[in-house]
């Protein structure tokens, strides 16, 4: 009998703590503005996330404002949530009173809020990074958690680099954290060093030996440096952890974090193995994945578990034969359980606004306002004139390109290119600037896309370096919609666009852009304008932040 058919009794609930907006945003190029963070936070609430780590409020005035707005606008939401309770909004803080106070000030307006503070405990970090001994470490933990618990009742403490820490020293530190008021103890494998057996044993050992262990929720936070983040997280769940710290699509520093969708679907698909339940609405997984990918510019690899383009694709003849006879032969999950739709032919050029809106609702985009719906519908009609078949994937690409874009500083009006194997690639570009004036220019390039980018650069006048360029067809056929994702950085020696939260010193960041069109040159141009707008907005934000700090 299939495991999904077996009745489950006495199941615990695993808390999903999503750190896409904090740890995930630390991925190179995953720059998000405040409005984008708000949209992702709203979607995380629909997804059923229990705790949203909205950011690192001390990092900058901009990060503080983003966390505060999420606490105000998303924190009270309960619509559509399986738990029927609003999402907890958490802010990260180092083990210092200044950080902790700043985090509390950002999240306190949310009906349910949490302070998450951390301090490294491995000898490597104590000696080389913090330059303190174990006794000083314990003193700092006690002071930090005591102060945090004087501000609110929901306190999470993380011993950074726990995976490489002395287990007996961890027992001491965590015992003191509990006595000081911690309600959640999170055990991070910060550098993705451990194996599932080791990490599972560590969680069990700490739960069995830490004084007061039964009074707190045990959490796990794993990184994917050895490709073991999900396996380690599930090993933690099997050994008593009841909170998992995850990100959408597994984004995060270096090789990334534990993937929310992988953990959620492992628990849903193997109930007898884990014997726990979650508040995650798995039908929202695909929409959330695509939103985060579009906003961050981080493309999901085709063979990525659960949300990759090939996750439910079958090409081998043996597999196809089995699928035609019985889908369970080669699929352990149904596409519908993660929000995918089997239908391909959806709408055409004769379809009306009502039919388009209904299809958007079916795809999970029923919350678009009138202006967003009109913009998406106009793009759909233009696409329908070019394509005989408009699929769900086409519509997803339209939404990503039309809705998930940064505020327009420069607007692309139109482009025209001339190229060929015996001609010099040339591009003419028309842009509307921040002053509302139309600007036109032309340039030569090594190819049509380069020519467009050179023309745009002549108009905008902001030097930058293209560090990544990716283009993919989201549907089949010669008339497929192309999605372009790019990353740019300010040119060497150019203006820095962000502040280091540790030192408050400026540093150069990478900015991503996303575009979609049946014309790959147009798609590439839209992606470039998107990235430029993000970079220019960040420059303005940094300028205001530096002015605030100077005063």
Image (tube, rainbow, N blue to C red):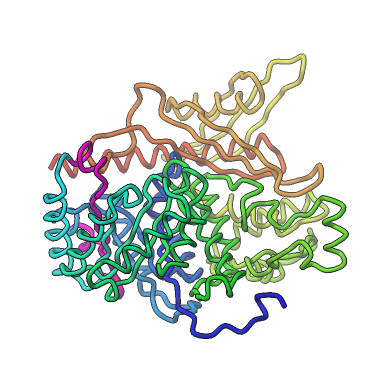
Q: State the residue at coordinates (68%, 27%).
A: 417
Q: Would residue 545 be found to the left or right of residue 244 on screen?
A: left
Residue 246 position, x and y percent, is 45, 58
Q: Quadrant of the N terminus?
A: bottom right
> Looking at this view, is 338 or 70 the one in front?
338
Q: Please tell me in which quadrant of the rendered image residue 139 appears.
A: bottom left
Q: State the residue at coordinates (50%, 38%).
A: 432
Instruction: Examine the structure image and report whether residue 114 is included in the region drawn in magenta.
Output: yes
> Looking at this view, is 71 or 135 the one in front?
135
Q: Please tell me in which quadrant of the rendered image residue 548 appears.
A: top left
Whether residue 353 is visible, yes or no, is no
Residue 328 position, x and y percent, is 77, 68
> Looking at this view, is 259 or 540 the one in front?
259
Residue 151 position, x and y percent, is 16, 68
Q: Please tell me in which quadrant of the rendered image residue 351 appears.
A: bottom right
Whether residue 286 is visible, yes or no, is yes
Q: State the residue at coordinates (72%, 22%).
A: 419
Residue 503 position, x and y percent, is 21, 38
Question: Count of labels shown?
Answer: 0
**What segment is highlighted magenta in the picture?**
102-130
Q: Would residue 349 be found to the left or right of residue 202 on screen?
A: right
Q: Would residue 338 be found to the left or right of residue 330 on screen?
A: left
């Amino acid at each position: 009998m299939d495991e999904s058919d077996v009745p489950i009794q006495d199941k615990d609930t695993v808390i999903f703590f999503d750190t896409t907006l904090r740890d995930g945003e630390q991925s190179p190029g995953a720059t998000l503005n405040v409005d984008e963070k708000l949209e992702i936070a709203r979607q995380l609430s629909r997804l059923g996330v229990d705790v949203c780590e909205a950011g690192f409020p001390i990092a900058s005035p901009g990060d503080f404002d983003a966390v505060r707005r999420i606490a105000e606008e998303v924190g009270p939401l309960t619509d559509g949530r399986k738990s029927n309770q609003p999402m907890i909004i958490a802010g990260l803080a180092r083990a210092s009173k200044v950080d902790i106070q700043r985090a509390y000030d950002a999240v306190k307006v949310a009906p349910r809020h949490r302070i998450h503070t951390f301090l490294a405990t491995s000898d490597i970090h104590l000696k080389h990074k913090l330059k303190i001994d174990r006794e000083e470490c314990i003193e700092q933990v006690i002071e930090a958690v005591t102060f945090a618990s004087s501000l609110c009742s929901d306190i999470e403490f993380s011993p950074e680099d726990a995976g490489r820490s002395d287990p007996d020293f961890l027992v001491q530190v965590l015992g003191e954290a509990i006595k000081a008021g911690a309600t959640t103890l999170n055990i991070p494998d910060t550098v993705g060093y451990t194996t599932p057996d080791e990490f599972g044993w560590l969680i069990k050992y700490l739960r069995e030996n830490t004084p007061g262990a039964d009074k707190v929720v045990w959490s796990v936070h794993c990184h994917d440096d050895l490709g073991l983040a999900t396996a380690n997280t599930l090993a933690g769940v099997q050994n008593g952890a009841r909170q998992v710290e995850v990100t959408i699509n597994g984004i995060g520093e270096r090789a990334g974090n534990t993937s929310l969708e992988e953990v959620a679907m492992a628990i849903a698909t193997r109930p007898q193995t884990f014997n726990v339940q979650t508040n995650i609405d798995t039908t929202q997984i695909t929409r959330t994945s695509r939103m985060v990918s579009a906003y961050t510019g981080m493309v999901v690899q085709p063979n990525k578990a659960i949300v990759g383009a090939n996750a439910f694709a079958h090409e081998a003849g043996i597999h196809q034969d089995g699928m035609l006879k019985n889908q369970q032969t080669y699929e352990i999950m149904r596409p519908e359980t993660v929000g995918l739709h089997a239908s391909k032919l959806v709408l055409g050029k004769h379809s009306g606004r009502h039919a388009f809106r209904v299809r958007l609702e079916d795809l999970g985009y029923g919350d678009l306002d009138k202006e967003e719906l009109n913009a998406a519908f106009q793009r759909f009609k233009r696409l329908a004139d070019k394509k005989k078949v408009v699929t769900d994937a086409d519509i997803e690409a339209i939404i990503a390109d039309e809705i998930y874009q940064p505020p327009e500083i420069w607007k692309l009006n139109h482009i025209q290119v001339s190229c060929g194997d015996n001609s010099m690639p040339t591009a003419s570009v028309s842009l509307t600037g921040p002053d509302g004036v139309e600007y036109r220019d032309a340039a030569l390039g090594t190819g049509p896309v380069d020519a467009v980018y050179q023309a745009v650069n002549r108009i905008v006048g902001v030097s930058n370096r293209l560090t990544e360029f990716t283009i993919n067809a989201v549907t089949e056929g010669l008339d497929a919609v192309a999605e372009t994702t790019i990353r740019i950085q300010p040119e060497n020696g150019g203006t820095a666009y962000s502040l280091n939260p540790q030192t408050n010193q400026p540093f150069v960041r990478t900015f991503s852009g996303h575009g979609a069109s049946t014309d790959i040159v147009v798609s590439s141009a839209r992606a470039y304008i998107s990235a430029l707008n993000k970079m220019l907005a960040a420059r303005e934000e940094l300028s205001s932040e530096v002015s605030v700090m100077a005063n």
